[in-house]
Each structure stands twice: as structure tokens, then as C-alpha cells.
Image (cartoon, helix red, strand yellow):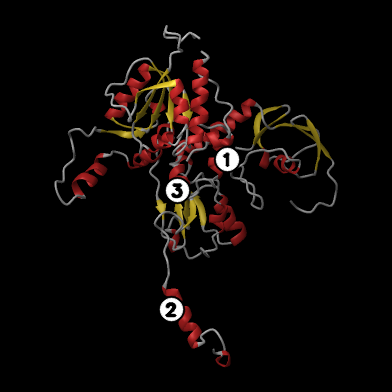
Amino acid sequence: MSTPNGNGNGQPRKLRFATAWLGGCSGCHMSFLDLDELLFDLAEHVEVVFGPLTDVKEFPPDVDIALVEGAVTNDDNVELGRAVRANTRVVVSFGDCAVTGNVTSLRNAMGDPDPMVRRVYVEHPDINGAVPTEVVPALLPQAEPLHELIPVDVYMPGCPPSAERIRNVLFRLVESLEAGQGIPAMDWRTPDDLRFG
Amino acid sequence: MSRRASRPSLPVTIDGEEYLAYEGETILDLARRVGVRIPTLCQLDGLSVFGGCRLCVVQTEGDHRLKPACATEVTGDLEVTTSTHEIREHRRRIVELLFAEGNHICAFCVSTGHCELQDLATEHNVDHIHYDYEYPRNTVDASHPKYLLDRDRCVLCTRCVRVCDEFEGAHVWDIAQRGSESRIVAGLDIPWGESESCTWCGKCVLVCPTGALSFKGRSTGEMVHDPEVIAFLSRARREGEWVGRKEQV
């Protein structure tokens, strides 16, 4: 059976699915892996084209759904966040760091991060005290939620969102996109799907 | 609710249903008595009315202003609407602004899962905050031996101020400064642990709707064991320190 998304060989085109890891602890990705056997069900519908578990360096084009974990806290996050938005139909703010800044934003109340960086890398260590300038991306003045950088389509709070919450939102998205209906309304969510923390 | 001599007599309509209200009853009292949910935050049964958080706003017929249900007494033939789209949006904005003006990191809070602000966010479908966060630089007062004040989590509901004044009679707490500078202070802005009027009763901690006031020793790494207490008990038993000489064992 062919669908509007068909690839011409009779099979419906799988949705292109990505995850991105910005300023977070990867706990949301761990929770995603907690989908366990549902990952097989998901794999029936999506092709994983980018994420910490793929060895792909550049965010690819024409992505249908991207789960973005973490706050925007350094230069790399800005670059990747913008690449995600430019190439993705449905961007999901995935977990509390992306949604609210969360733990990553604890530093914000202290203002300029430079004194903190000096404290950690220069004053505290016993040897080789120096602020790293290579490889490690520069911190932004503040860690911000993802929607401060790019427009976000769906918000999935939680630290981390439980596997059940991820399933509820993700499978609803997949179903809706496969049916050509775009981003579904999120008014069905129960308190289990919405809670911060 | 006080004991009432008379029967309810004032006809009041809430969301299209007619009820009889007592003289002097607030809209919130009546709504709760008849099972209509109006969200609240600063209000707490037993404490005086503050009316500051504005979560409980309702619409009354013939008045375009939203009124706090906790601070508005019913009148006869009052028509109250508790939950239109506009009212719910108004409440949602209040909740979002509370998050934006504090440093509420739910995942990192002693009260997560038991927090009225967190619950209100869920109830009002807050899945993110539309406003810019303020990231205020607040101070934590850990000077009290038993309790902790983290102003990052304070929503200025004044429950602690009221309970300390109205129940304990100690009046340790007040709000200092104004507007966005407002903050809870002990005494005339002294460390809580130095307050001579604090009786250590802990009522302020019990009524706090968020994690702003907490018991020390409840978060990660804070549990302090006291194994020496057994030697103390053993000696007391051996020496008969708590009993008359004749009852020694």
C-alpha cells in the first residue's frame, strides 16, 4: 500500500527521527532507551538518522521528528539547536532542561559564568590549572530553555520524562504524521504527562 | 468554618447551578462546601485571608473585573463563574509568572511531588513557561539548627508570616522590601537562627506550599546518624537515671 509519503517501492516511507543532546545529563536519552521492547515498535515506523547513538556528525536534512534534550548553555548547543530547527518538521523540547533550563540553569543566578569556570578549572585543581580553550565549547552568559533559541512545537517536561510519557507523546506524534495530519493537539495529556521534575 | 446558628439563605449561582449560601460566607467557602473546585495558593483554611496570589479569581455577573473568591463575600442573587477559558488562562499566566520570577528547579527540590506550585502547573497544563526567566540571585538562610529557608522557591504567599503571627504568636516572619525585591525575612532581617522570638515550633515549615521552608536533614547527604545515643540509653538504664532508686534494674 502506498501513502503520500511512499518511496515508490510500495512501502510507506519511514519517518526520519533524530535526537539531539544539548546541555543536559543524557538522562532523558536514558529514559528513551527505557522504552525497551517498544523501541522495536518504534523502529517499524521511524528511521533513526541522528543522535548520540548514531555516528553521524552533521545534522541531516528532512527530519520529521527530533527530540532535543538539554538547555542551550554553550556555543555548540546554539549551532546544533539551529541546525535541528532548520531541518526538522516537529521539534520536541525533551525533558526539563530543554523545557525550563532546569539543573543546567542553576548557574544563571550567579551571573557571569567566568568566575565559576575559573573556580572549577584554575583555583580548584591541584595540577594543570587552566581554563580549557580547545575542544570544549565556550559557555553562554546564561543557560536558556530551548524555546529561547528556536521555536519549539511540542514540550515534554520531566526530569527525566518517564518512558511511558515518552511513549505517549512520541507514538501520538508518529501516528499523526503518518496520517498526514501534522502536529496533534496536546490537550489529551494527563497530569502524568505534564509534571515538571 | 464557624458554627452557624441559621440555615443558608442567600441564593447564589455558581457556574449555572443554584445554591444557598450563609451570610458572610466567601465565594471560596461556598464553592468548596458544594464541591466546586477553585484553585488556591496563598489561601489556607484556618489562616486569615491574604488574597495575594490571585489564583482563585472568579467572574461575577455585572462586573468585568475578576475577583478573588477567597476574599469576596457572597451577596444574594450573586452569579459566579469559576472556570471560563479567560479565567483559566489568567490563572495559567499567574502560575507561569511565579515560575519565571523564582528559581524553581523541581527536579532538584526537597518538595518535588509534594508541591502546590508544581501541582498548579500541572492542573493548568503548563508545559513550559512563556515568559523570560528572571534568575534572581536569592539567598538561602541555613542558620536555623532545624529548618531551612530557600528563597529561590518562595512564592511570597505569606502563609508562614500569618501562621507564626496568628497561631504561634511569635511573629518571626515578615516581608521585607517591595515589588520584585520582596523577600521573606526573620525578625528585622536577621539570620533565622539568631531569632530569639522563634520557638522552633515548625508551623511555618508545615504550611509552606513549596520547598521554600523545609526540615533540615531530608535531602541527599544530609541524614545525620546518632549511634552514640545507644551508649547514652544503656548508661541511663544501668544507672537508673530516669527512674527512682528503688526501681533500678
Direction from residue A148 to residue B199 in the image, left or right: right
Tell me where residue A146 appears, x and y as whole percent. 39, 28
Residue highlighted by disc 2: B231
Q: Earlier in the sequence, mark 3 or mark 2?
A: 3
Q: Nearer the viewer, residue B161 or A62?
A: A62
Secondary structure at badge 2 equals: helix
Marks 1 and 3 in Cβ contact (< 8 Å): no
Task: Tell which subunit mark 3 falls on.
Answer: B
**Are the residues under marks 1 and 3 on the same chain?**
yes
Q: Are the residues under badges 3 and 2 in a single subunit?
A: yes
Local packing at callout 3 (Cα closer than 10 Å; few below 14, some 14-19, many 20+) is many
Instruction: Give the label, 1 or 2, closer to the camera.
Output: 2
Q: With respect to residue A129, does A65 lie above or below?
A: above
Q: What numbered label is drawn on residue B53?
A: 1
Q: CA distance from mark 1 to mark 3?
A: 17 Å
Q: Contact, CB < 8 Å: mark 1 with mark 2?
A: no
Give whichever of A191, A75 is nearer the camera.
A191
Type of the residue with mark 1? Cys
On the image, the x and y values in percent for residue A162 come to: 48, 37
Q: On the image, numbered disc 3 is attached to which residue?
A: B151
